Image: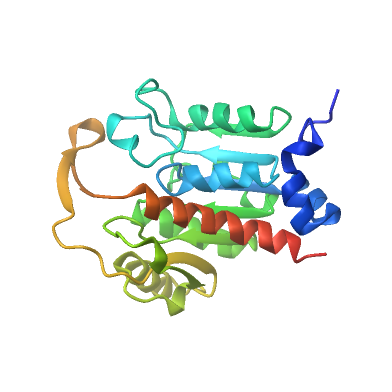
Amino acid sequence: MEPKGIPPHPELTRRVEMLLGPAAMERIARARVLLFGLGGVGSWCAEALARSGVARITLVDPDVVVATNVNRQAQATSRNIGAPKAGELRHRLLALNPAAEVTAINLAFSAESADFFNLAGYDYVIDAIDSVDDKVLLIERCRQSGVVLFSSMGAAAKRDPTRVRVAPLGETKQCPLARIIRRRLRAKGVDDAFLCVYSDEPPLDGASEEEEGPAGRRRRVNGALVQVTAVFGFTLAGLVVNDLADRG
C-alpha cells in the first residue's frame, strides 16, 4: 500500500514534476497546508493545491452548500445543496488523489475557536475568510506564530480577471477590504508585510444586495464571478507551490 500523502500513481503529477523537478515534488507532497474559507476563492485554491501535488491539506469552513454557491465554488453542485462545504471539498480532493491526507473541519475561525487551531503546526496558512473580524484575528495569530501566511482580499464585485495582483498588504491599491484590514492591523501593531492576492479593479457599483443569513440575520452580499474568484484561488495556490519549489 502507498504511504499516505503520496500520489498512488506517479502519472498524476508527472507534468508538474517535469516543470519543477523531483526534489520540489517531494517538498510539495510533504507540505502541511491549512486553508480557512472554502468559498469562491478558497475552494479553487484547494483544488489547485491538490492537482499540483500538495497532499496534506486541512480544510476549514462552517457552512453548507447553498444554491447561490454553484456559480463559483468548486465543490458546489445542484446535487449537494445542504451538505457541508468542507466535507464535499474533501471528497473532491480525494477523488483527485486518494492517498492524500485531507482533513475537513466544519468550524468557523473566530475568537471562540482560535485556540483550537495550532497554526504553527503547519507550513502554510491560507486565509480566504470573508468576515473582517475573523480575518483580522487570523492574520494577527499567524503573524504571532511565524507561519507563512498568504491572504485573499476582496474578490467580489469585480469583473476583470486580468487585474488580479499579488503584493504585500501595505502596497495594495483599489481594494476596500484590504484598506480596512490594513487599518485594523496597524491599530493593533501587527506587521502588514505578508503577501496577499487582490484586484486593482474598482468594485462595481450596484453589485450587492441583502439576503437572510444564519439565524435569520440580514446580511449584505456581493455579486461574484468564478472567472475572478478562481483566479484569486489559483494565485494563492501558486504562491504556495512556487515557494516550495524555490526552497531547493
Q: In screen coordinates, is 168 left or right of 57?
A: left
- Residue 120 in percent (x, y) is at 67, 53
Residue 160 percent coordinates (x, y): 33, 62
Q: Position of residue 248 (x, y in %)?
A: 83, 64
Q: Which color scheme is applied?
A: rainbow
In the image, what residue occupies the spot 78% across and 53% down?
Answer: 18
Can the viewer see residue 220 in this picture? Answer: yes
Which of 113/96 is in front?
A: 96
Seen in the picture, residue 26 relative to 143 is either above or below; the reply is above
Q: Is residue 233 left or right of residue 95?
A: left
Q: Name the residue located 43 percent from the left edge and 46 percent from the top edge.
A: 110
Res. 114 in view: no
**In terms of image quadrants, where is residue 70?**
top left
Instruction: List the single residue furthest toward the bottom.
Output: 171
Residue depicted at 40% across the width and 61% down the height: 153
User: Would you say 15 lies left or right of 106 here?
Assistant: right
* In-front residue for pair 143/70: 70
Q: Residue 237: which quarter of the image? A: bottom right
Q: Is residue 219 above or below residue 99?
A: below
Q: Residue at x 85, y 55 (%)?
A: 23
Q: Identify which residue, 15 or 224, lies in the foreground.
A: 15
Q: How many marks?
A: 0
- In this view, the residue in front, 58 or 49, is 49
- Quarter in which the N terminus is drawn: top right
Residue 94, image x, y percentages? 63, 29
